[in-house]
Image: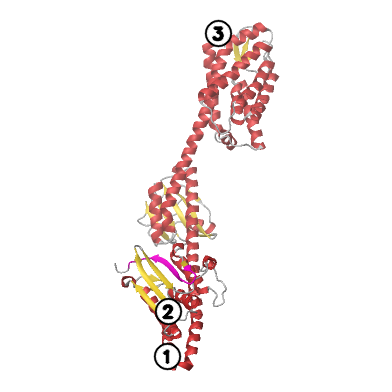
Amino acid sequence: MEGISLLDLLVIMLERVGMIVAVAFILTRFQFFKNLVHHDKLNRKQELTAILFFGFFGIVGTYFGVALNMNTLHFNSVATVLTSDEAIANSRVIGVVVAGLLGGYRVGIGAGLIAGIHRMTLGGFTAISCGLSTIVAGIVAGAFYRKGKALKPVTVFGIGALAEAMQMSMILLISKPVEKAFTLVEVIGVPMILANGVGTALFLLIVHNVISEQEKVTALQAQKTLRIANQTLGYLRTGMNADTAQAVCTILFRELQPSAVAMTNKTDILAHVGVASDHHKVGSPIRTDETRDVIHHGGLVVVNDGTIHCDYPGCRLGAAVIAPLIRRGETIGTLKLYYPSEKVITDVSIELIAGLSSLLSNQLEIAETDRAYQLAKEAEIKALQAQISPHFLFNSMNIIVSLIRTDPDQARKLLTSLSYFLRQNVTGTTASQISLEQELSHVKAYLEIIEARFVDRLTILYDVDDNLLAEKIPPFTLQPIVENAIHHGINDMVKNSIIKMTVHDVGTEIEIRVEDNGKGITPERIAILGLTQIESESGTGVGLFNVNRRLMMTFGDQAALSIKSERNEGTIISFRIPKLEVGV
């Protein structure tokens, strides 16, 4: 190669930069390099890997250069050893500068040492100056490193050009004879400064763009997964059956657009949307051996073209991805997505389907947990209801016993009322909710017994909206509140005792209040009343505690008891429940 002009040398150098493009694409596949680009902190192993990689990249840049003989001014390929009259026009500085910009001082200097020492071993009259300038390039690039910030391409071009310009300066300062050094810089200076500046900028620009596109694809996949999760959540939370499976398959078919989507349990097809739905019918037995294998082994399977062993003649299903649906560690069914051919099934789509399988399995786990919680909740409510019945019976029997001597007829009447009340108790322990009318009748039966004890000292007032009598309420809600008002409020009053019950419509809710004009409750006791079982001289607080707990378990925290009281002025206990507007 002879008679090459500066322009020709620039073109040759830019052609060598083409190698940079290929390497940049390859680098985007390495996790340590992605960490470098994102300016994450590297551990020692990753840092050493980066130093060795970029150092090796600098060595490759040296060999991809061209050797200039200063006596003949001819260019040749780079050999393993240079003569004393030869120097190299190369792209070594690109790898070192990129190392410093992405990894900081340690990575830049480490790569510079590897590439620089290697350059010194090749010889030539610029060996020392070029080797030292390579190390200096790593230091300069490290100075521009900014954690968490990406540099603009123009800035990167300037840094690459600056590093190469410094190499030209060191050749002029160190290399001897000076005449040869000056001639060399005159011939290769401008082409190398421009080419290596462009190469450095192009390297980082390509890397950032490729990784950005990869992240964009990942973000779109995540967005799609979240959209699918949002749409399917309401279905599988109720369990896996033909209806929910059909809804989920329809959503997946619309979002992912495969040839078909299907879901099965262990034995039968629950849903099939798309190609071959004419014979892969809901409720029919599983038709493919691959599906049975997934259920048996519990692992995701990719089925190749033409190997779906459907027993229906002429089945048009091609390749497929079959993923297990797992609940409590047991495979209870499969999710199947069919495609025209295996070529359409990418690694990204396999990962997506595996993620969806895990997502749907988690939803089924949540559905199972919800059902178990609901059963436990219902069981606890039944236990609480049963707990109230003997609590009331004990107090009622005390009243009746006290009347047997003084008024046997009244005692018989009260026993009849008690008999009715206990029959209602039995009914209540088997019902989660009853009508307000039934609950009020229950309380009135209780108060008939209580009035016998107080004779003329107690007045019962009712302010009830008759339009609300068909609304629903948990049984045994009002009686413990009324009992609390009597035994802890008016029990010691000698006259003019009042109990008032109010049931009012307040928009979308029903407000129920029980008021008394008794001795009231201290603020300290109000703070804990209904929240725990508390000890007292005349009771345990279990009645209000149970009522409050059942109201919150049935209607939510907003239905909790509200207690207002003033000493010697009475107490108001109220709560609000949703209005079902029966019959409206």
Q: Position of residue 54 (x, y in %)?
A: 62, 28
Question: Mark 1 packing: few (<14 Cα in 10 Å), some, or many (20+)?
Answer: some
Q: Position of residue 104 (x, y in %)?
A: 62, 29
Q: Of label 3 and label 2, which has the lower sequence position?
A: 3
Furthest residue toward left: 584
Q: Position of residue 579 (x, y in %)?
A: 36, 66
Provide the secondary structure element on which disc 1 rests.
helix
**Which amino acid does the dot numbered 2 rest on?**
Asn
* Tag shown at residue 496: 2
Q: Of label 3 and label 1, which has the lower sequence position?
A: 3
Q: Which residue is mark 3?
A: 3
The answer to whether residue 410 is visible is yes
Q: How is the image coloured?
A: secondary structure
Task: Judge whether residue 570 is colored magenta.
Answer: yes
Which one is in front in this view, the residue at disc 3 or the one at disc 2? Answer: 2
Provide the secondary structure element on which disc 2 rests.
loop
In the picture, the quarter occupied by the C terminus is bottom left
- Judging depth in this view, the residue of 214 and 430 nearest the camera is 430
Q: Is residue 495 left or right of residue 47?
A: left
The segment highlighted magenta reads 565-581
Q: Of label 2 and label 1, which has the lower sequence position?
A: 1
- Judging depth in this view, the residue of 38 and 64 nearest the camera is 38
